[in-house]
Image: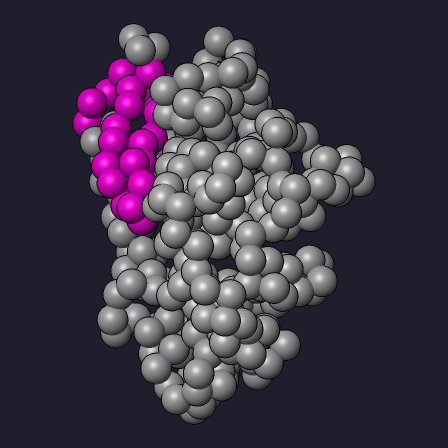
Amino acid sequence: MADHWIGRFTAMASPCEVLVETSSHKEAAALLELISSEAWRIEEKFSRYLKGNIVHQINTANGAAIEVDEESARLLDYAAVCYELSDGAFDVTSGILRRVWKFDGSDRLPDPASVAQLLPRIGWNKVVWNKPRITLQPDMELDLGGLGKEYAVDAAATLLEGATQASFVVNFGGDLFVSSLRANGEPWRIGLDDPLHTGENAVGQLQIERGGVATSGDARRFLLHDGKRYGHILNPLTGWPVEGAPRSIMVVAETCVEAGMFATMAMLRGPEAEAFLDGEEVKYWCER
């Protein structure tokens, strides 16, 4: 578009971009470098796929206490809040279920016995978190993937707000933050992805003046078995996909992390997703 600049990169296995209302290529390049470096820093620090970072240290401590830095402690505090608010459904120890669930669009369901064997290894209530030390049982794992991308969006947006007066949008794989109204006084327009044709078609748009936006759904990660679709949002209490959940939920909140929390918690409520969001009085769009 002629009225704003777009910079792109890849991080956290997602296409990432920043849209900035600036005509200065020098400023634009500097802002892109700023947020891409921040996204890569957060990915390197918190990705469960990388060795040597704080998550790897915690997961391989074999029951020993690990002392974490302040940034990691804030994420762990937030994970604890999410666990409490969701009655145990939003659980950062449930990532271990990925060992048996492969949401690759195939029809291959895991053996129920293999799922059941993992359930004793799940439960934030089994974690000892006495800031700044965390202790996991030897057979448990921590996975901050449910918080990491949204956290990276907010962190990048904070850096941008300290570096430019221009209006901008940070978009990491569909999770985003809008800084302000545009120079012409209009809000940014955010497309609503069609879960039946994800990435190819929009079914509407939201007008955002300022705030975070996050989406949760099964458009990209699912299984299809005997005509039944199994989304990737798993209930940590059962080890199986949540029944009756919407195809897609997009939430607007003050921050991207908050929007992501509401979107995930709503998905975990299954058929009660809309009632939950209505009760929280948040702005959302839902597709079933």
Q: Looking at the rendering, in which quadrant would you find the C terminus?
A: top right
Residue at point 31%, 32% (across, down): 17
Residue 178: within the magenta? no
In the rendered structure, does residue 6 fall within the stretch colored magenta? yes
Quadrant of the rendering where the N terminus is positioned: top left
Q: Is residue 78 visible?
A: no
Residue stretch in magenta: 4-27
Q: Residue furthest front?
A: 226
* Direction from residue 7 to residue 158 in the image, left or right: right
Q: Which x, y percent locates residue 220?
A: 40, 37
Looking at the picture, tell me which residue is in the foreground, 44 or 2.
Answer: 44
Please tell me whether residue 31 is drawn above or below residue 49 in the rendered image.
Answer: above
Q: How is the image coloured?
A: one colour
Q: Nearer the viewer, residue 184 or 15?
A: 15
Please determine whether, in this image, residue 251 is positioned above or below residue 235.
Answer: above
Q: Quadrant of residue 162?
A: top left
Q: Name the spot of residue 239 as percent of width and height, x first.
A: 55, 63
Q: Looking at the image, which residue is at 38% across and 65% down?
A: 99
Percent across and percent down for residue 93 are: 51, 69
Q: Does the rendering let one see residue 28? A: yes
**Measuring 56% from the left and 28% from the top, which residue is drawn there?**
210
> In the image, is residue 56 above or below residue 237?
below
Asked if residue 246 lies left or right of residue 26, the reply is right
Which residue is at 20% across, 23% downward? 25
